[in-house]
Image: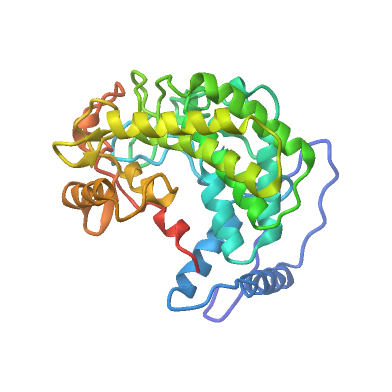
Amino acid sequence: MNKGECIPFSLNYRASHEATQQVIDAEQMLKECEQAWRKWSGRCTCEGRWRDAMVRSLITLKALTYAPTGGLVAAPTTSLPEHLGGVRNWDYRYCWLRDATFTLNALLLAGYQDEAMAWREWLLRAVAGSPEDLQTLYSVSGERRLGEIEIDWLPGYDGAAPVRVGNAASKQFQLDVYGEVMDMLHLARVAGLETKPHVWQIQLALLKFLESNWQEPDEGIWEVRGPRRHFTHSKVMAWVAFDRAIKDMQAFGLDGPLERWQQVRDAIHAQVCAQGYDAQANTFVQSYGSPHLDASLLLIPQVGFLSADDPRVRGTIDAIERKLVVDGLVLRYSSAVGTDGLPPGEGAFLPCSFWLADRVSC
């Protein structure tokens, strides 16, 4: 090729039993693609200083969406290491229920109701069934069987092995997902998204299970591959599940055991404040009886468990700022929490941009 020349190259895929696809006009398709993305981005209702950054983030959310079902994957990649040369190389090409509330809230705040509706419908299809079988993640089409295998004949990114397909976290017990599902459905109702009667029946089943299991230990938000613990964030999100159900009953006239759920909500709140808080250090901790901090504790005021000006919240924020913030980014937890059977500290210092920005209104 010479300077100024443009030679199109297109690549497509089809099953062997399907007819050959027609050759596309690559230049025309590229033009139409750009127009479609500009039109979609132009629908963003957010204004202000950070509009460009928000549009960029919304484009990423849209690009991660599987159009036929509305499912939204955590990442389009697998086995990129959390630590260069390390072994925490997970497959993230799946839809996490935990992402539901944050994604729905971001889409609704930006004016993308169709995408929010599609994401909610994917979630409802995925979680339908027995609440004890609720998974942390599903495929873009809602499949549940996501067994994790290692591909030993691939070298991995920059030699970081093993390369994995599937994710064993799909079989973990993570209490917080019940809170995120209930919060998402609450946000959808408040935003005026049409809600069918069977949705509340699904929620009743989820809460019935949670009522009997919220005091159980779990693997937590970071999906530790070690002993289950009573994670503070998990209990807070169990509180969220009952809190949002109570709010929906009061605001939308839904039928349920209001007084009993209020008692459960209060019991969870009291337990977290008693066992998830270190009074001597003036901070909430990662799990009951643990001295360690955790970035997920920053969500305590965001979900309404306590107000942002509560002294216990202020103490937690101050402690996280001192011990977990590096170059403006928040570490998930301290390297001392390497209890999942993998090399101590590996990946624990991975800076992560936490989800607080998703909660900030446009």
Q: Quadrant of residue 108?
A: bottom right
Q: Quadrant of residue 190?
A: bottom right
Q: Position of residue 5 (x, y in %)?
A: 59, 78
Position of residue 143 in the picture relative to residue 169 (left or right): right
Between 17 and 5, the one nearer to me in the picture: 17
**In this view of the protein, can residue 73 be seen by the observer?**
no
Between 232 and 124, the one nearer to me in the picture: 232
| Quadrant assignment for the N terminus | bottom right
Position of residue 45 in the picture relative to residue 347 (left or right): right
Colour scheme: rainbow
- Residue depicted at 49% across the width and 44% down the height: 77
Q: Position of residue 88 (x, y in %)?
A: 35, 33
Q: Position of residue 112 (x, y in %)?
A: 65, 63
- Tally of numbered discs: 0
**In this view of the protein, can residue 64 be seen by the observer?**
yes
Position of residue 153 in the picture relative to residue 32 (left or right): left
- Residue depicted at 27% across the width and 24% down the height: 339
Q: Residue furthest right?
A: 19
Residue 291 position (above or below residue 186): above
- Residue depicted at 28% across the width and 40% down the height: 294
Residue 26 position (above or below residue 138): below
Q: Residue furthest front?
A: 259
Q: Position of residue 318 (x, y in %)?
A: 20, 52
- Residue depicted at 40% across the width and 25% down the height: 219
Q: Residue furthest left?
A: 280
